Image: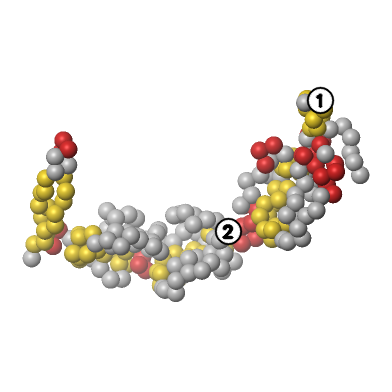
């Protein structure tokens, strides 16, 4: 049985309709025609957790099959998907797997087949193709500054170059609440552009001019 759907064409700002014929026989092996298919077809490297609610008529993979790479690739059994290093195929994985930037997040309770990180490994981020890295390497991978490190309980009032210019600020009131994130390593303070620098590279203002800090206040 032949299927039809309307497509809106806009040539030279004039609206017209054309009939596009969709023939069931055009579907390849392991595919079937669906009048209301998903706008986000699953493939070996990406399982959409969320998708727009719309009907997309066309050929889709049969149950138990997924696209090999993208929407135009062939449909293969899920079990034949090649997982990357430090990954394994799971028929019932989480829709919201942990990443270095997001752990134990709220998630819908559903089975999502696909490649997941092995025990002891975690996704670097939630981007498609993100590698699974050892959990021990996760935290510092979030810090782009070589002089910073990740900590679960950092100070709410990190030392800055302003503190070097105005030592009184070092004794300001500060919350004792822990903050997780990237903080300057010991021996460094926050300088210009939020980069971690040595205190001696900070400068102090004298008569509107900048001068290298040459004194240390104990």
From the viewer's perspective, is 180 left or right of 87?
A: right
Quarter the N terminus occupies: bottom left
N-terminal label among 2 and 1 = 2
Q: Residue at x 84, y 49 (%)?
A: 171
Report whether residue 60 is seen.
no
Question: 115 or 164: nearer the eye?
Answer: 164
Q: Residue at x 91, y 44 (%)?
A: 218
Question: 174 or 72: nearer the eye?
Answer: 174
From the viewer's perspective, is 142 left or right of 42?
A: right
Image coordinates of residue 90 in percent, x first then y, are 44, 70
Count the numbered circles shown: 2
Report whether residue 146 is seen.
yes
Regarding mark 1 in the picture, which secondary structure is present there? loop
Whether residues under marks 2 and 1 lie with C-beta atoms below 8 angstroms apart, the answer is no
> Residue 128's image quarter?
bottom left
Q: Compute the Cα span from label 2 to label 1.
A: 46 Å
> Residue 189's image quarter?
top right
Q: Which residue is mark 2?
A: 100
Image coordinates of residue 43 in percent, x first then y, are 35, 60
Q: Which residue is mark 1?
A: 207
From the viewer's perspective, is 160 left or right of 52?
A: right
Q: Residue at x 73, y 61 (%)?
A: 177
Above or below for 91 versus 85? below
Image coordinates of residue 94 in percent, x first then y, are 46, 70
Disc assigned to residue 104: none
Packing grade of label 2 (10 A; few <14, some 14-19, many >=20) is: some
Image coordinates of residue 89 in percent, x first then y, are 44, 68
Above or below for 115 versus 9? below
Q: Residue at x 16, y 45 (%)?
A: 9
């Amino acid at each position: 049985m032949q299927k039809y759907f309307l497509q809106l064409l806009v040539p030279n700002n004039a609206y017209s309709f054309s009939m596009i014929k969709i023939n069931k026989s055009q579907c390849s092996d392991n595919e079937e025609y669906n009048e209301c298919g998903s706008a986000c077809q699953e493939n070996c490297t990406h399982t959409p957790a969320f998708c727009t609610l719309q009907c997309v008529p066309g050929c889709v993979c049969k149950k138990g099959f997924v696209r090999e790479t993208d929407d135009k690739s062939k449909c293969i059994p899920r079990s034949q998907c090649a997982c990357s290093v430090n990954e394994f195929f799971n028929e019932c994985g989480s829709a919201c797997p942990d990443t270095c930037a997001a752990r134990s997040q709220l998630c819908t309770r559903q089975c999502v087949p696909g490649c997941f990180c092995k025990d002891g490994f975690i996704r670097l981020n939630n981007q498609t193709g993100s590698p699974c890295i050892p959990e021990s390497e996760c935290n510092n991978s979030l810090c782009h500054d070589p002089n910073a490190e990740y900590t679960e309980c950092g100070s709410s009032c990190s030392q800055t170059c302003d503190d070097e210019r105005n030592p009184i600020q070092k004794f300001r009131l500060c919350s004792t609440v822990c903050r997780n994130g990237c903080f300057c390593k010991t021996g460094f303070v926050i300088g210009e552009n939020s980069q971690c620098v040595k205190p001696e590279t900070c400068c102090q203002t004298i008569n509107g001019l900048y001068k290298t800090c040459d004194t240390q206040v104990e």
